[in-house]
């Protein structure tokens, strides 16, 4: 899904955590493209992607059942070491930080959500969240995500996610772990 990889890269490449992760601007897009591509393929083996019909927004969900995670950038495997190149240590540090704080109980993990920049604010991301949350609520499944940006954190809060204290990278760049319990609507 090259279009999805490109959309996700454009959504995340200027976030503070990605700038810390890949500080060399001239290499950032290429390395991030490779890392996102590996993550996206691994996630789709154990999850799903929802997108708008025009492909202007995507949400990638990893179904965490409490067992081992698939290889994602930063995890020690040969494909990710090649992709992350001279920043492999930073990818490992990020993966360790995120894994240390990841909930163990079964849930769906929103790995990526991206919206075309010229379509932001139109409710596309919210529509994708509502669609998936309806299924999660019906099945009693919680959701988890880690937000790299305050405005995204605020969007997720409007959809029922509760932020924990931020995780900080060595340069102080924050990630907000967020949890959403399934909604139980009374009839």
Image (cartoon, rainbow, N blue to C red):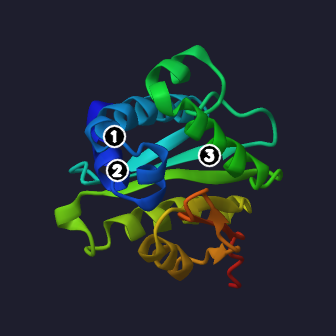
Q: Residues within 10 Å of mark 3 (few under 14, many from 20)?
A: many
Q: Quadrant of the C terminus?
A: bottom right
- When the figure is inspected, residue 65 is found, relative to residue 121, above or below; the finding is above
Which residue lies at the image location 31% right of the left edge and 32% below the top edge?
30
Question: Are circles 3 and 2 on residues that touch, CB within 8 Å?
Answer: no
Q: Position of residue 149 (x, y in %)?
A: 46, 68
Q: Secondary structure at mark 2?
A: loop
Identify the residue shown where x is 72% and y is 77%: 184
Q: Which mark is residue 94?
A: 3
Q: Is residue 5 left or right of residue 74?
A: left
Is 156 left, or right, of 11 in this rendering? right
Q: Earlier in the sequence, mark 3 or mark 2?
A: 2
Q: Is residue 181 above or below residue 112?
A: below
The outermost residue toward the top is 78
Q: Quadrant of residue 46?
A: top right
Residue 49, given in percent of the width and then of the height, sits at 45, 44
Q: Does dot 3 land on a helix, a strand or a loop?
A: helix
Q: Nearer the viewer, residue 56 or 5?
A: 5
Label 3 or label 1, whichever comes before in sequence order: 1
Of mark 1 and mark 2, the one earlier in the sequence is 2
Please say if the residues under marks 1 and 2 sit with CB atoms less than 8 Å apart. Answer: yes
Q: Position of residue 50 (x, y in %)?
A: 42, 49
For label 1, the residue is 28
- Above or below, 47 against 122 in this view is above
Residue 13: image tag: 2
Question: Quick one: quadrant of the N terminus?
Answer: top left
């Amino acid at each position: 899904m090259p279009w999805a990889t490109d959309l996700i890269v454009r959504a995340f490449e200027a976030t503070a955590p990605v700038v810390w992760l890949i500080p060399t601007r001239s290499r950032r897009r290429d390395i991030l493209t490779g890392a996102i591509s590996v993550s996206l393929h691994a996630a789709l083996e154990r999850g799903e992607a929802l997108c708008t019909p025009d492909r202007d927004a995507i949400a990638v969900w990893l179904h965490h059942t409490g067992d081992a995670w698939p290889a994602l950038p930063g995890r020690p495997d040969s494909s990710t070491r090649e992709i992350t190149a001279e920043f492999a240590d930073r990818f490992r540090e990020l993966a360790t930080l995120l894994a240390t704080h990841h909930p163990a109980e079964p849930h769906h993990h929103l790995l990526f959500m991206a919206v075309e920049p010229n379509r932001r604010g139109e409710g596309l991301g919210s529509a994708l969240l509502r669609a998936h949350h309806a299924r999660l609520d019906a099945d009693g499944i919680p959701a988890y995500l880690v937000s790299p940006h305050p405005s995204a954190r605020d969007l997720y809060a409007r959809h029922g996610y509760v932020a924990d204290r931020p995780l900080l990278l060595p340069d102080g760049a924050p990630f907000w772990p967020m949890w959403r319990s399934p909604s139980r609507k009374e009839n």
